Amino acid sequence: MSYYPVLGATGTYLAFLTGNIGNMCLPSASVAQSVVGAEPGTRKGEITASLAIATASLVNIIILIFVILGGSYLISLMPESLVNSFRFVLPAIFGGVIAQFAIQKPVWGIVGIAFGLFVNLGPVPRPLQTFLCILGTVVVCMLLNKLKTQKEVE
């Protein structure tokens, strides 16, 4: 809602559709409005913001296409042992996130470790391990939090 005065209705729609509002859409709209001398909240300002966001999104897509194709080419040049290590990236990221939560609520860390052990040592197919570990940890932690708040209310 705080972006609406600068972006207008169309710009807000485009910004939420494309994402990256604070780092890409809002600055491009603001600079474009400054360049053409349009006041935020006016019809000219809304049109300018919409065109700026659309242009920024197209430039972002074009750059991403080159980065993706270049990255795919670089990965094809890497040794197989290095490429195989990439499958540990997502679990490492989520492990770091659960570790941050475990500092505040140690029970959540225990739940995350328990699910990690169960999923990796149990009969879970490899492609589902990360997904089930994350899903199980989130669901159990939400249930534990809900039970805790119910006990506090009673």
Image (cartoon, grey):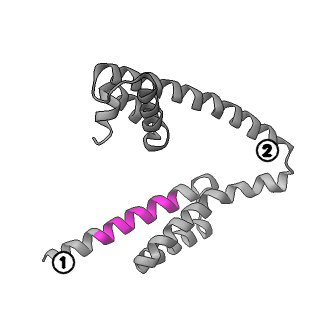
Q: Quadrant of residue 88?
A: bottom right
Q: Is residue 130 above or below residue 48?
A: below
> Which residue is identified by label 2?
75
The residue located at (57%, 54%) in the rendering is 128
Residue 152 disc label:
1
**Taking the image as drawn, is residue 34 in sight?**
yes
Q: Nearer the viewer, residue 48 or 66?
A: 48
Q: Is residue 55 left or right of residue 17?
A: right
**Residue sticking out furthest to the bottom:** 106
Across and down, in percent, residue 39 comes to 32, 27
Amino acid type for the residue under numbered disc 1? Glu
Q: Nearer the viewer, residue 40 or 83?
A: 40
Q: Earlier in the sequence, mark 2 or mark 1?
A: 2
Q: Secondary structure at mark 1?
A: helix
Q: Nearer the viewer, residue 3 or 60?
A: 3
Across and down, in percent, residue 127 comes to 61, 52
- Residues rendered magenta in the picture: 132-145
The residue located at (57%, 72%) in the rendering is 117
